[in-house]
């Protein structure tokens, strides 16, 4: 009788699920026909979905506004980069590094969480924002006196995933289909996504998940009900951060290069926007938000220029400017007309609904 | 007839200041196992302050509390809840956007153990515990009489039902002492009457209840013993009929004619 979590149930919903699965399996090949760039764009979209689901634990479940989430992404990415590149000459396999990265990010999450436990709302946002910047600046400056992160130049030539004889950096021909590197990463990301979605759903509907929501709803009452709010909040930070670290590791491998520039405040805000736009707390909403916000800028990037050329015969507005303008407008409109997100958690939807005055 | 008194809670010399205000001065009281103990007093007498000290929300400045034969550490509300004191709030504090069922399930937190890994792997132990939490929560919803609203959001329930739900959530922690902060506040006569039946039922089931209440009629009719606070000090503690005729109590409530 787990009523509030509406996972598409297996019973009676088999056909749409099978169709969705087939579509997702076929997707990278269809995209490859348009251009490999689109497979890469899709991969980054899935990475952002993973990040949003991690942040959703902190912001959506526990209600802790975290503006420095990208720091954990950075930690995961740098752990991967340092342990699988010529920078230190260490080349560990990915299945060892990814858990290490997630674990170190998890510790970082708890370290960030500890000083913020007494803070709420705006104050918490400011402190976490500061933490995000500190991590980035650390990465930028840890090239002296001992060169650990290679500073602003970043770390290049990061190893690709390797599963037995399959190298994710090369193309393979299998059954007449070309499995390019990005396509292989796509399948790996999809696998990771499935695991993360299941874990998220299970956490939400557990003793710990209820404690998170209880803290979000009323911290004093949560304490009085016997919840050790300090530990449970730290747990939210740590869990969210470990998902960030995991995504970071995959990002480093896919990109083959990491530098502090990838982990600016903008990224944190973008991930937060995905969570809020999609619908805080609702796993499917968060996924929808992340997919939408990842693709929208890319689609605009590829359409703004041709459309202008077709209409005006010349470039009127710089594509980059117009892209951000449309993007911002879409966000504002969504928040105006769907304040609880595109696909809100049922309880948020009711919370945000306008209550008629009696 | 001498009977050995079974003391559940023994507070001695509790003091609490807020800046220059002496909210509690050397308050000592003992609550016996199985009784309904009333704490009354005019507005600002320090009832809620005492309550908040007792439940770990405020840190006391002086005094000791022993509970169930052990000294009670009051460092944090959750340790107090774990020790066996559950409370409700004067202004109802439910988890508004959770269902009634979930609210009570949260109350089971302190008596259960499943962690993150149990939840992620959904182990056998975790599933068994979840089923037990749910079963217990259902039972409690029935007990307080709001089972029909199990899947309603807490904040969409009626005022009286919210009070009951808050009691169910407190009961979920399996307390030895249930502390109710003005449970009848804002209730109409019918709701108060049925609340009274509920509290009497709790005592019949062996629970000890500490009741803060403005409704003197309810307190006098319901409580086995009553303490009266005035200006942060205890001015009386006895059975209701004695307290009622105590001149100090009458003075505190009505004031004196002559000075």
Image: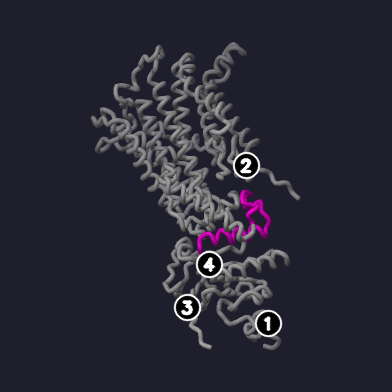
Percent position (x, y) of residue B147? 63, 54
Cα–Cα span, label 1 and label 3: 28 Å
Label for residue B255? 1
Q: Residue at x 59, y 59 (%)?
A: B166
Cα–Cα span, label 3 and label 4: 16 Å
Question: Magenta region: which residues?
Answer: B146-174
Do tags 3 and 4 sit on the same chain? yes
Q: Which residue in the protein does label 2 denote?
A: A349
Q: Is residue B206 above or below residue B157?
A: below
Frontmost of labels 1 and 2 is 2
Task: Please rate how many residues cluster around mark 2, counting C-alpha atoms within 10 Å: few if below 14, some from 14 to 19, many from 20.
Answer: some
Chief secondary structure of the magenta portion: helix
Q: Which residue in the protein does label 4 denote?
A: B52
Between B186 and B99, the residue placed more toward the observer is B99
Q: Is residue A187 above or below residue A129?
A: above
Residue A29 visible = yes
Residue B49 visible = no
User: Which of the 4 image quarters holds residue B70?
Assistant: bottom left
Percent position (x, y) of residue A39? 45, 21
Q: Which residue in the protein does label 3 denote?
A: B12
Between B52 and B38, the residue placed more toward the observer is B38
Frontmost of labels 4 and 2 is 2
Task: Please rate how many residues cluster around mark 1, counting C-alpha atoms within 10 Å: few if below 14, some from 14 to 19, many from 20.
Answer: few
Q: Secondary structure at mark 4?
A: helix
Percent position (x, y) of residue A283? 52, 37
Q: Chain of mark 2?
A: A
């Amino acid at each position: 009788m787990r009523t509030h979590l509406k996972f598409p149930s297996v019973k009676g919903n088999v056909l749409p699920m099978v169709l969705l699965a087939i579509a997702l399996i076929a997707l990278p090949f269809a995209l490859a026909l348009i251009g490999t760039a689109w497979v890469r764009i899709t991969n980054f979209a899935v990475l952002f979905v993973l990040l949003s689901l991690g942040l959703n634990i902190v912001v959506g479940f526990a209600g802790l506004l975290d503006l420095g989430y990208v720091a954990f992404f950075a930690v995961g990415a740098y752990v991967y980069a340092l342990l699988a590149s010529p920078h230190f000459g260490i080349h560990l396999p990915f299945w060892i590094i990814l858990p290490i990265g997630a674990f170190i990010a998890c510790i970082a999450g708890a370290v960030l969480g500890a000083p913020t436990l007494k803070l709420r709302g705006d104050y918490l946002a400011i402190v976490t924002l500061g933490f995000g910047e500190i991590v980035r600046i650390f990465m930028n400056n840890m090239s002296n006196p001992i060169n650990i992160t290679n500073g602003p130049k970043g770390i290049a030539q990061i190893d690709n995933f390797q599963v037995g004889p399959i190298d994710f950096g090369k193309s393979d021909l299998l059954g007449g289909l070309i499995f390019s590197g990005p396509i292989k990463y796509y399948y790996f990301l999809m696998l990771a996504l499935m695991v993360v979605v299941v874990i998220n759903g299970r956490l939400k509907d557990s003793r710990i998940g209820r404690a998170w929501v209880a803290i979000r709803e009323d911290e004093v009452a949560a304490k009085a009900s016997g919840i050790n709010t300090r530990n449970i909040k730290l747990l939210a930070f740590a869990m969210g951060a470990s998902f960030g670290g995991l995504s970071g590791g995959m990002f480093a491998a896919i990109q083959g290069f990491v530098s502090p520039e990838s982990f600016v405040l903008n990224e944190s805000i973008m991930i937060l926007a995905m969570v809020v736009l999609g619908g805080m707390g609702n796993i499917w909403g968060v996924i929808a938000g992340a997919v939408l916000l990842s693709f929208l800028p890319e689609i605009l990037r590829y359409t703004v220029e041709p459309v202008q050329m077709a209409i005006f015969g010349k470039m009127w507005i710089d594509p980059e400017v117009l892209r951000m303008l449309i993007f911002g407008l879409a966000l504002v409109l969504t928040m105006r007309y769907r304040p609880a997100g595109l696909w809100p958690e049922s309880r948020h939807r009711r919370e945000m609904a306008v209550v008629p005055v009696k | 007839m001498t009977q050995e008194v079974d003391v559940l809670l023994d507070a001695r010399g509790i003091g609490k200041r807020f800046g220059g205000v002496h909210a509690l001065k050397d308050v000592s009281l003992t609550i016996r196992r199985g009784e309904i103990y009333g704490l009354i007093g005019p507005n600002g007498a320090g009832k809620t302050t005492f309550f908040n000290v007792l439940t770990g929300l405020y840190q006391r400045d002086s005094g000791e509390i022993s509970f169930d034969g052990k000294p009670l550490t009051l460092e944090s509300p959750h340790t107090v809840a774990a020790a066996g004191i559950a409370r409700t709030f004067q202004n109802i504090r439910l988890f508004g956007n959770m269902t009634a069922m979930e609210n009570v399930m949260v109350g089971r937190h302190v008596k259960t153990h499943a962690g993150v890994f149990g939840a992620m792997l959904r182990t056998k132990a975790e599933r068994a515990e979840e089923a037990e939490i749910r079963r217990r929560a259902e039972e409690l919803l029935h007990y307080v009489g709001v089972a029909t609203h199990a899947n309603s959001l807490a904040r969409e329930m009626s005022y009286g039902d919210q009070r009951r739900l808050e009691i169910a959530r407190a009961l979920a922690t399996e307390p030895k002492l249930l502390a109710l902060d003005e449970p009848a506040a804002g209730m109409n006569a019918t709701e108060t009457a049925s609340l009274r039946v509920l509290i009497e039922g709790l005592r019949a089931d062996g629970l000890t209840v500490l009741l803060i209440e403005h409704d003197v009629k309810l307190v006098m009719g319901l409580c086995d013993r009553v303490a009266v606070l005035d200006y942060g000090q205890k001015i009386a503690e006895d059975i209701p009929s004695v307290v009622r005729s105590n001149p100090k109590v009458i003075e505190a409530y009505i004031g004196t004619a002559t000075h």
